[in-house]
Image (cartoon, rainbow, N blue to C red):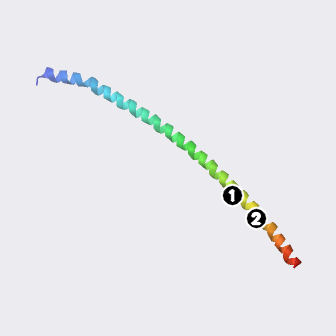
Amino acid sequence: MSDSQILGLVAASVPTMITVLIGILINNARLGDLRHYMAARFNEINRRFDRVDSRFEEMKDLWRSELHRVEEVLDARLKHLEERS
């Protein structure tokens, strides 16, 4: 192979390599954007679940206090019935 053939081969393959390199860099940037978008969405979902968890805890505390009140009323009524008999 002569020097001119090697030079022609290199000259023909350089634009292809540059095009492939540019494509790789663009895809890498787009993947970074996608990763950032997905992370933001997952963080938002985690915040929503945290709010739901806190609402469940509030409801559990409310039910616990209400049941405690009902238990006290029943105890008072039973004590009253026991005293009458």
Q: Secondary structure at mark 2?
A: helix
Question: Residue 83's spot in the image, x, y percent?
Answer: 87, 77
Residue 40 appears left or right of 68: left
Q: Residue at x 42, y 35 (%)?
A: 31
User: Observer-nearest residue: 21 or 85?
Assistant: 85
Residue kind at label 1, given as amino acid type: Lys
Q: Residue at x 84, y 77 (%)?
A: 82
Task: Choose the circle earlier in sequence order: 2 or 1.
Answer: 1
Residue 68 appears left or right of 6: right
Q: Secondary structure at mark 1?
A: helix
Q: Which residue is mark 1?
A: 60
Residue 25, by quadrant, is top left
Q: Residue at x 28, y 27 (%)?
A: 17
Image quadrant for the C terminus?
bottom right
Badge 1, how many Cα within 10 Å: few under 14, some, many 20+? few
Question: Residue 28's spot in the image, x, y percent?
Answer: 39, 34
Q: Which mark is residue 68?
A: 2
Image quadrant for the N terminus?
top left
The CA distance from mark 2 to mark 1 is 12 Å
**Residue furthest front as drawn:** 85
Rendered position, 5 above or below 62: above
Question: Residue 84's spot in the image, x, y percent?
Answer: 89, 77
Q: Residue at x 65, y 52 (%)?
A: 54
Q: Which mark is residue 19?
A: none
Residue kind at label 2, given as amino acid type: His
